[in-house]
Image: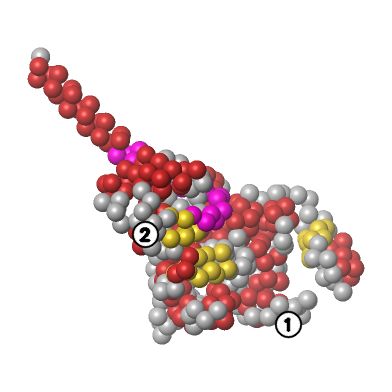
């Protein structure tokens, strides 16, 4: 009888241990808020762990003072936190915040970079070079050159493979680069950060923005994340507002379903490396798998790095009676039309 009681107690202890471990791991690795904003957080000299955790909780940077303190204690970090001014964001986990404090990643050791929705990798590289951070070619060598199929360009070194680190890259073909996945945002980077550090930060941001619900919905639709990012990259370049993005997404998905060419000028701009008010007939005939006038279906890959609205629009399109659209030259307004004849008429009115 005593043996059975001891056995039950051992089993209960083991179960309790695994349950506690599960909740602990979940608590230290999750964010307080997936859509938080940057917060200035100051640690004064001599400030203790209890006060730091209290301040973090008050500023809504962590959800649990208890797990923050337990994490520091378990990792032996209580005496290693460095004083200073930090820029934190609720999107960071307890583990990430603690690492920042221990490494002393204060504002005086940081630079701020901002990449814009719709920039492609070449434009991001040019921005880095202009800011004096890295040479443009260095980024392209790391993440891949635009429109390069590395199966047929063996003389060029393949870009770095991050798929083992980020599961959302699992369905991306390994012979193309990271165009589409360098999430546009404002980033704080350390003065000694490597290019790889910056790319990982962008990919990590993408990973956090693409929620589990969104991933489930993509799978339910029978699509891949790569297809969604490719569509989002197109929608991002075509229109501005989220509402218009959803309608345009619906138009493009319908064209694919009906085996119509997408006929997007954004793909011509990507291939030609030039934005034009109107493209010529000769432009639409250019020989490239990315030319959506000459090829059916989605492009072989993304043509830009889309923001969250464009990604959501690609996942959640709005299907309407519209079949065509254009952007008014003077106002930037999206003009939709049901028929080709109306579309031609709108071109004469709005594309001046």
Q: Is residue 335 above or below residue 31?
A: below
Q: Is residue 5 above or below residue 290?
A: above
Q: Residue furthest top?
A: 1
Label 2, on which residue?
Answer: 82
Q: Splitting the image into 4 quarters, where does residue 302 fall?
A: bottom right
Residue 26 seen anywhere in this rendered image of the structure: no
| Label 2 vs 1, first from the N-terminus | 2
Which stretch did the figure color magenta?
21-41
Distance between mark 2 and mark 1 Cα atoms: 62 Å
Residue 190 seen anywhere in this rendered image of the structure: yes
Q: Residue furthest bottom?
A: 155
Report the quarter where the N terminus lies.
Answer: top left
Q: Is residue 35 magenta?
A: yes
Q: Residue furthest front?
A: 46
Q: Give coordinates of residue 342: x percent, y percent.
A: 87, 61
Residue plotted at (67% across, 66% down): 237
Q: Give coordinates of residue 8: x percent, y percent.
A: 18, 22
- Give whichever of 69, 317 is nearer the camera: 69
Q: Is residue 331 left or right of residue 1?
A: right
Q: Is residue 82 left or right of residue 146?
A: left
Which mark lies nearer to you, 2 or 1?
2
Q: Is residue 253 magenta?
A: no
Residue plotted at (21% across, 32% down): 14
- Give whichever of 60, 284 is nearer the camera: 60
Q: Residues within 10 Å of mark 1 (few under 14, many from 20)?
A: few
Residue plotted at (87% across, 74% down): 352
Image coloring type: secondary structure
Q: Splitting the image into 4 quarters, where does residue 162 fall?
A: bottom left
As helix, strand or loop, the secondary structure at mark 2 comes to loop
Q: Residues within 10 Å of mark 2 (few under 14, many from 20)?
A: some
Label 1, on which residue?
Answer: 282
């Amino acid at each position: 009888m005593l043996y059975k009681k001891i056995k039950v107690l051992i089993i209960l202890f083991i179960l309790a241990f695994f349950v506690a471990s599960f909740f602990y791991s979940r608590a230290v690795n999750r964010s307080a808020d997936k859509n938080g904003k940057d917060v200035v957080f100051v640690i004064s000299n001599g400030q203790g762990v209890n006060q730091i955790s209290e301040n973090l909780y008050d500023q809504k940077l962590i959800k649990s003072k208890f797990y923050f303190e337990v994490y520091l204690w378990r990792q032996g970090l209580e005496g290693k936190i460095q004083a200073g001014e930090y820029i934190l964001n609720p999107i960071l986990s307890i583990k990430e915040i603690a690492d920042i404090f221990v490494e002393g990643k204060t504002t005086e050791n940081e630079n701020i970079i901002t990449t814009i929705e719709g920039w492609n990798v070449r434009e991001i590289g040019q921005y880095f070079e202009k800011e004096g951070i890295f040479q443009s070619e260095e980024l392209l060598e790391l993440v891949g050159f635009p429109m390069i199929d590395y199966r047929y360009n063996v003389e060029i070194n393949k870009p770095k493979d991050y798929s083992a680190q980020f599961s959302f890259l699992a369905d991306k073909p390994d012979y193309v680069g990271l165009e589409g996945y360098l999430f546009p945002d404002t980033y704080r980077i350390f003065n000694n950060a490597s290019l790889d550090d910056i790319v990982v930060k962008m990919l990590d941001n993408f990973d956090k923005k693409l929620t589990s619900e969104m991933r489930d919905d993509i799978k339910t639709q029978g699509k891949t994340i790569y297809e969604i990012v490719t569509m989002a990259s197109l929608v991002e370049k075509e229109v501005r507002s989220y509402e218009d993005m959803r309608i345009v997404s619906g138009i493009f998905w319908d064209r694919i379903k009906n085996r119509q060419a997408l006929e997007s000028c954004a793909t011509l701009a990507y291939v030609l490396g030039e934005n034009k008010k109107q493209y010529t007939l000769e432009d639409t005939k250019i020989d490239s798998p990315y030319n959506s006038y000459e090829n059916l279906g989605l492009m072989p890959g993304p043509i830009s790095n889309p923001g969250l609205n464009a990604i959501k629009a690609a996942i959640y399109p709005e299907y309407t009676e519209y079949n065509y659209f254009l952007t008014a030259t003077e106002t930037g307004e999206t003009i939709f039309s049901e028929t080709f004849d109306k579309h031609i008429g709108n071109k004469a009115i709005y594309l001046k």
